[in-house]
Image: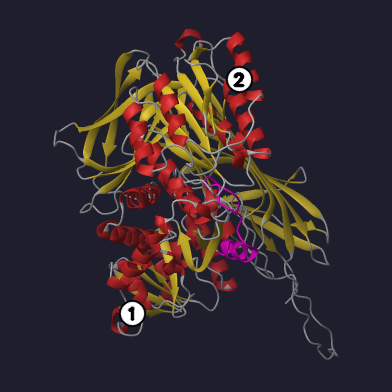
Amino acid sequence: MSRCSRLFLWSPLALFIALFFGALGASAQTVVIIHDPIRPIPLPRPIPRPAPQPVPESYKIKSLEVDANIEDQIAKVQVSQTFENTCSRQLQVSFLFPLPYDGAIDSLTLLVDGKEYPAKLLPKDKARQIYEEIVRKNQDPALLEWVGTGMFQTSVFPVPAGATRKVTITYSQLLRKDNHLTDFLFPLSTARFTDKPLEHLRMRLTVNTQEKLKSVYSPTHDIKVDRKGKNRAVVTIEEKDCVPTTDFRLFFDTAKTDLSASVLTYRPDSDEDGYFLLLASPPIEQEGDEKTKKSVIFVVDRSGSMSGEKIEQAKEAAKFVLNNLNEGDTFNIVAYDSDVESFEPELQKMDEKSRKRALDFVDNLYAGGSTNIDGALSKAMGMLKDDTRPSYILFLTDGLPTHGEQNEAKIVANAQKHNDVRSRVISFGVGYDVNSRLLDRLSRECFGQSEYVRPNEDIETHVARLYSKISAPVMTDVAIKYDLENGGGNFVNRLQPKEAHDLFAGEQLIVAGRYRKHGDAKITIVGTVGDKKQKVAFPAKFVKESDDQTYAFVEKLWAMRRIGEIIDDIDLNGKNDELIKELVSLSTKHGIITPYTSFLADENSSVSDLADARRGGMKSFSMAEAETRKLGESAGRSGFAQRLQKGAYQKADRANGAFGGFGGGGFGAPGAAQSAPATPAAAANAYAGGAVYQDVDNDRTVVASNIRNVGNETLFLRDKIWIAEDAADIDPVKDEKKIKTVERYSKEYFSLVAANNKQQNALLAQQKPGEQLLCNLRGQYYLIK
């Protein structure tokens, strides 16, 4: 066999490349097949020499670019991949392109360096034969999750040794629309089988709608959304040296009204509570007199520990806020060390004169003295008198209270006592010395949130990003009511977040929850707009049982937010045995490894240990209970990292969105949680699909090589067998009679593949050469060898 004839799996836009000797090769989006005819060797035949060792790889992916133009439900997509033949000889290759599912495809063409090559569309039954043939011949299951989709196949073309080729595929797709949401899917997940990152990935989607474009949401990736008016948005993703680990999915909805909402529901078992996700979108922007007037007070720490670069960054952050206030807003600046000083004794109305004077005040701030947190908060709260306009206190500190009241509970109680207008306290904790528990408690009791800035991060960047989101309140003191049309009383529970507080222009509210009863429902959003109460109602449908796993991510997203709520409750209210048990249960079921359940990633744990965790046994409870004692650390590196990670769980808007570092945001790249960098070893494990968690003692991202997350499923490596979470109660030795053994790539194996859904085949696709897999398929336990 040629030394260039091995199978490689890659995928970013679903460009999946399979290289092998002389037959079909395929894999998730574009599949490259090498056609290498066998040449007869004339007599006398030479004495064979030892075969050379295969080269590490036969091609290199340089870039992947996806451009899509979406007009309501019609998507026109262009996918360009640049790859290099790293072999020492010319290759004859062809491409297979597994078609994106959930939509009708037409007008599909392929260009190689601008030259069009003939191709044909294959229906799913014919494509299934090709997929299975590739899996069988190459002894690699990575393509299994694409069984059941159609395929686009090209003719053969040459790629010279060392040459680079740009392959471009264009197609049109009718997007699916359900529950008022249009769904765009682009297959990327096969990249998790590669051992090398993609050098450059760029996706750009332009969405145009006839009605007002409202929610634009990705449950899989950290997207940038640039609004271009009320009917258009540009969605972008750009990453370098990354490995996409999940398919890209984008939902958007439209409405005739300024405020709209859509609901996604998922209920895998009709006998258990279902899961739902509410997306609410206010107007994209407010104009002129429509802009809600607000009050903003920037409270900045100028104690001695803020000297140097920190005080300069804090001053730039204050300037950003001042320069982005609207005329008619009221504001003030409070600077504190041992003493508390304000720009003016009372709130000032923003105009160009007051802005200039305030900027001069900021320029003259200097660091020195102790830290009077209580005095600063009391002074700021005392300035807020008008309860008809939303009020925000941006509170920044880098340390502990060292002057005035220093008791954590009393400081928070005093803030609550003086908060007559329900102002929102947005706390910024800078560096590891901050009392992070105090900030979390303050933000929770004062209707705000906490943001944490690592020692090597820029203060202004954090303040600017958060202030930009809250700068234009549209509706305040928001309440959401859920009613079934046939009655039945309150049927939703465990909402995350419990209270919505405010809606901001251009930002969408995401609420995750559970529901008991099914049927058509009415969602009513009530809040204050200006000085008037307003309410808007929307229809929704809560399903009895889900037909497929299209919205399965809703369950895991809810679990992540619930885990954040549990940790917050234990952190601020103390130990609670029932909450610790629930934490272990959710962490095990969903493969969400927290700082308090990292024992699940212990490479020395056994099958019985996993079973104990799944059923909430005493051993796992005791280990989790011991780890939660770390929450007693109110300050320091560990305390900082714990509250940062807790906040990431609470604010997660994607099923994999509570982690930065490898595995977060759908990529092997930093994500929403602002996690510290992963180690090189962790990065390698992440490429293999390892679960990510945070080592809070060192504030570092860690990847568990013995845990794999596959959509909503989790695999645990125990005693050299990969065990699916729903098979964790079975002991491969003691319960041998309950288990059916199947040989991989056998006739029986492919019968299972044919009966499986996409998620079940994705689970099988995780099994690598030499590994065993224990799983539960349709109520039967299988050990696949």
Question: Badge 2 local density, few (<14 within 10 Å), some, or many (20+)?
Answer: some
Between 155 and 396, the residue placed more toward the observer is 396
Residue contact between numbered discs 2 and 1, judged by CB atoms under 8 Å: no
Residue 544 in percent (x, y) is at 23, 46
Q: Main secondary structure of the magenta part?
A: loop
Judged from the image, the secondary structure of the residue bearing numbered disc 2 is helix
Label 1 sits on what residue type? Asp
Report the residue at 48% width, 22% height from top: 296
2 to the left or right of 359: right
Judged from the image, the secondary structure of the residue bearing numbered disc 1 is loop
Residue 569 in percent (x, y) is at 32, 49
Report the residue at 80% width, 53% height from top: 164
Between 9 and 23, the residue placed more toward the observer is 9
Residue 622, above or below 553: below
The mark that comes first in sequence, 2 or 1, is 2
Question: Badge 1 local density, few (<14 within 10 Å), some, or many (20+)?
Answer: some
Between 570 and 91, the residue placed more toward the observer is 570
600 to the left or right of 70: left
Pointer 1 residue: 731
Residue 461, above or below 457: above
Residue 528 in percent (x, y) is at 33, 19
Residue 713 in percent (x, y) is at 41, 60
Task: Say which quarter of the image contains residue 685.
Answer: bottom right
Numbered circle sitting on residue 224 = none
Range covered by the magenta-colored residues: 668-688
User: Is residue 433 in sight in this rendering?
Assistant: yes
Pointer 2 residue: 323
User: Is residue 184 in sight in this rendering?
Assistant: no
Q: CA distance from mark 2 to mark 1?
A: 64 Å
Check the picture and name the quadrant holding the N terminus: bottom right
